[in-house]
Amino acid sequence: MATPREKPSLTGEMKMPQLDRIPAIPLHDEHVVTAREALEGLYLKLQQEAEVRLVAAALRAGWSAEEAIDAIDDLRKEDVQVVN
């Protein structure tokens, strides 16, 4: 396999390309997360952000926060019923 060629820096010095951009491959004994573990934090954050935006839109439309939250809960119940 060919080795990476050196590239001149802005100062004219020759530097090797940075290899730290390549992620390390975990060893067999390191903890490898499941897809659920990897996605759960982002999923919850997006769910919270969506709820905040929905409530804000409802408030701008003249609804109370309680009405907005009740409507969001109803929509979630409908989603669960459709999936089941």
Image (cartoon, rainbow, N blue to C red):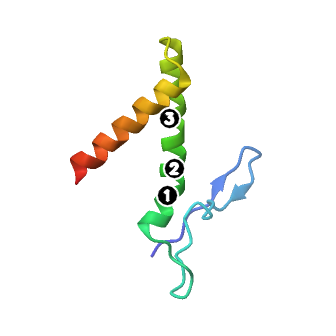
Q: Mark 1, residues whose alpha carbon is within 10 Å: few (<14), some, or many (≥20)?
A: few
Instruction: Classify mark 3: helix, strand or loop.
Output: helix
Q: Is residue 54 left or right of residue 81?
A: right
Q: Is residue 1 left or right of residue 23?
A: left
Identified by mark 1, the residue type is: Glu
Q: Label 1 vs label 3: CA separation?
A: 16 Å
Q: Residue at x 50, y 42 (%)?
A: 46
Choose the circle earlier in sequence order: 3 or 2: 2
Furthest toward the right, the residue is: 11
Q: Which residue is mark 1?
A: 40
Quadrant into which the C terminus falls? bottom left
Q: For residue 17, what is the image quadrant?
A: bottom right
Mark 1–mark 3 contact, CB under 8 Å?
A: no
User: At x 54% / y 46%, what residue is drawn?
Assistant: 45
Q: Residue at x 58, y 60 (%)?
A: 21
Tell me the element at label 1.
helix
Q: Residue furthest bottom?
A: 29
x and y percent of residue 2 in the render?
48, 72
Identify the residue position indicated by label 3 in the image: 51
Residue count near mark 2 (Cα–Cα under 10 Å), binned few <14, some 14–19, many ≥20: few
- Residue 35 horizontal/vertical position (percent): 42, 65
15 on left or right of 52: right
- Location of residue 60 in the rendering, given as x and y in whole percent from the top left corner: 52, 13
- 66 in relation to 43, above or below: above
Position of the N terminus, as image quadrant, is bottom left
Label 2 sits on residue: 44
Q: Amino acid at mark 3?
A: Glu
> Which x, y percent locates residue 78?
29, 40
